[in-house]
Image (cartoon, rainbow, N blue to C red):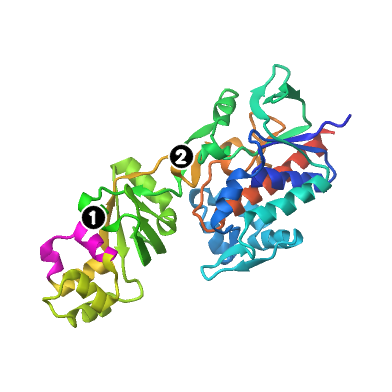
Amino acid sequence: MTRPILIIGAGPAGLMAAEILASAGHAVEIHDAMPSPARKFLMAGRGGLNLTHSEPLDRFITRYGAARPFMDPLVRAFTPAHLRDWCHGLGVETFVGSSGRVFPKSFKASILLRAWLHRLSGLGVTLYTRHRWTGWADDGALCFDTPAGPLRVTPAATILALGGASWPRLGSDGGWASLLAARGVPLAPFRPSNSGFDVAWSGGFLERAEGEPLKRIAIAFKERIVPGELVVTRTGLEGGALYALSAPLRDMIDREGRAVVHLDLKPDLTLPQVQNKLARVPPADSLANKLRKGLTLGPPMGALIREFAGDADLGRASTLAALVKALPVPLTGQRGLDRAISTAGGIKLSALDANLMITALPGTFACGEMLDWEAPTGGYLLQGCYATAMAAARGAERFLAESR
């Protein structure tokens, strides 16, 4: 009897690896601990599933930061254009939004997932849910806890696609790390990525601004400037503009205990233009009126400026203009793994060969977020999961061909 290729994890990376292998004629089984597949994928799609991004590929690949040398050939082998074509093949049309992000026209992850699972079923892929992987038996068989009792499977090859350590209630709990560490697989500690940051707000500020959006702003940190939006939370700030700087901000806080970002509250105007507009407002007007009349900035912006500036700074148009264009906001910490959209850490990239096989575990491959790469939101996370899944599936095929 032909032994199957076993995929552990039914998120987007695991499902993509299964499709590649089943399309090539391999017998494929997927085992997942949760009651249904792709739960985090469905959660991510609640606000409109951001599949990938339309920016030029050379720029796209820079979004993977320190992991760029590793991710570059993988993303070039399965590009955003390939991903859109794949969606269209499922009958799911896509479009490019005003931000350059790519979405399904329906905006619904559930429609794409339903079509995808139908395709996998037609290819003969068997999906087992409530099968929690517990490690290896002495003879190398994979062990699972299942509703029917313990299960042992000896596959032809294994692909691990177990996710990172964010959103544990959806299945990505990082519990696999101890199993791999016991086998000598080098791991990097999990750290939050694409999460909010802490700010020591005053009570008075929170009364006026908690829950308020900061729209059409830009964040500067070191040499980078990221436009977007933020939301004031009880503990700090959240939002895509901040997530894009997640890695360097986290590293700065780890080293120095804090990081200072500068908010440009009027990025469509230059500093001289802001000065000129504020100078036309009567000096006796309140701060709120100066910002509203001169710059059409609403109440949260005035409260935000007051939080980090003294009365003397607010009385001079030139100083106020400088604060509007570069308001320093100290970040004192980052939200934890349980509140992060994604994670850094996991299997060190040096632990993999060119086929994404774990060198300490011949015949076992890994892909998706369980690898130590990270990227900002905007489509880069899903693209990375798909691209690494493609590489792991092709690597497993080569391994099996060479083993015959």
Residue 338 marker: 2
Q: Secondary structure at mark 1?
A: helix
Please provide percent x and percent y for residue 399.
76, 37
Residue at image mark 1? 205
**On the image, which quarter does residue 369 sit in?**
top right
Crowd rating for badge 1 (residues with CA inside 10 Å; few <14, some 14–19, many 20+): some
Residue depicted at 63% across the width and 35% down the height: 34
Residue 179 marker: none
- Looking at the rendering, the stretch of residues picked out in magenta corresponds to 300-315
Please provide percent x and percent y for residue 294.
24, 78
Which amino acid type is shown beneath numbered disc 1?
Phe
Seen from the viewer's position, the closer of residues 147 and 228 is: 147
Seen from the viewer's position, the closer of residues 301 and 54 is: 301
Q: Is residue 177 left or right of residue 6?
A: left
Q: Is residue 77 left or right of residue 155?
A: left
Q: List the single residue furthest toward the front.
A: 207
In the rendered view, would you say 99 is above or below 44? below
Please provide percent x and percent y for residue 168.
52, 37
Residue depth check, mark 1 versus mark 2: number of the one nearer the observer: 1
Residue depicted at 34% across the width and 59% down the height: 212
Q: Is residue 360 left or right of residue 301?
A: right
The reply to whether the magenta stretch includes residue 320 is no
The reply to whether the magenta stretch includes residue 301 is yes
| Quarter of the image that includes the C terminus | top right
**On the image, which quarter does residue 83 sit in?**
bottom right
Residue depicted at 69% across the width and 26% down the height: 146
| Pointer 1 or 2: first along the chain | 1
Which amino acid type is shown beneath numbered disc 2?
Asp
Residue 369 visible in this rendered orientation of the protein = yes
Report the Cα–Cα distance between label 1 and label 2: 26 Å
**On the image, which quarter does residue 253 sit in?**
top left
In the rendered view, would you say 61 is above or below 123? below
